[in-house]
Amino acid sequence: MSNQDEQPENRLRRELPEEVPASVPEHGQAAQEAPESALTGRQRLVKGLWPPRVSRAQLIVAVLLFGLGFGLAVQVASNSDSDSALRGARQEDLVRILDELDDRTQRLEDEKTGLEKQRQELQSSSDQASEARKQTAEKERQLGILAGTVAAEGPGITMTIDDTKGTVQADMLLDAIQELRAAGAEAIEVNGVRVVAGTYLTDSGKTVSVDGNKINAPYRFKVIGKPQDLEPALNIPGGVVQTLEKEQATVTVERSTKIVVDALRAAKRPDYARSSSQ
């Protein structure tokens, strides 16, 4: 049969390429892919997350976060213990603690200001040697006041303890001295005896001895310091005044703009200690 006799559809079929049969996946591959397509969305999520694939960097970050969390937990626990201790305190105790903290902070600030002023004077003085001698003399005078070898005057209070029953003991007067020192007292005199760092009090019958000097009631304290700090320190609830009044003693505290402490202590030369400065 000639080309002319061929039907159009037969010629078209012969010109087209033969159909290529679709590739049939191998049996193993089909078995492997079939379950994948059968998984639900949640199962695919779980399969993607487990087992976890942790890198070295992620492990280091996890350890650091654990350490930070542990430190925060310890800090919170410590603060909780302190808070619980303060919550159990009485209101008057909390007020006293706050007042003492404020007083100590103020004294430290004043000392800092004084030291900075001395430094500025030394730096700006044209005659630094003269200024240094002047400051040394001032420092010697201040130390003399603390040591009781020179007289002192300034604002303060006078406390009088009238003990008609003879019930006031040495430890009660010592508590008063310690409370005054904690409140910022700079010079103290009791019945003509200068109180210094090494002062001791003992009971002597129905009276008291200060550094071996027997004193009798009424006990009169002359104290130099800030009156606004000294008087409240004595009158806090459960403090010196209330303790003495429980012993049927009468306590009177008066503020003054000028208190003179002129009882002196002899300068004692140390037996063994020597200055280490050359």
Image (cartoon, rainbow, N blue to C red):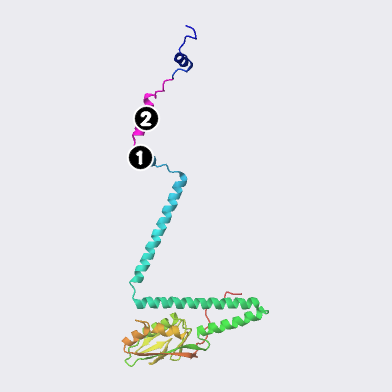
Residue 34 is one of the magenta-drawn residues:
yes
Task: State the residue position of label 1.
Answer: 41
Task: State the residue position of label 2.
Answer: 32
Horizontal and vertical percent for residue 227? 45, 86
Which contiguous range is marked in magenta?
Answer: 20-43
Horizontal and vertical percent for residue 189? 45, 88
Crowd band around label 1 with a 10 angstrom C-alpha radius: few (<14), some (14–19), many (20+):
few
Q: Is residue 26 above or below residue 79?
A: above
Disc nearer the start of the sequence (2/1): 2
The amino acid pointed to by label 1 is Gly
Q: Is residue 101 left or right of residue 46?
A: right
Residue at the image point whose x is 59% and y is 83% from the top: 137
For the residues labelled 2 and 1, the Cα–Cα distance comes to 18 Å
Crowd band around label 2 with a 10 angstrom C-alpha radius: few (<14), some (14–19), many (20+):
few
Name the front one of labels 2 and 1: 1
The amino acid pointed to by label 2 is Gln
Residue at the image point whose x is 41% and y is 53% from the top: 66
As drawn, the residue found furthest toward the right would be 126
Q: Magenta part mainly helix, strand or loop?
A: helix
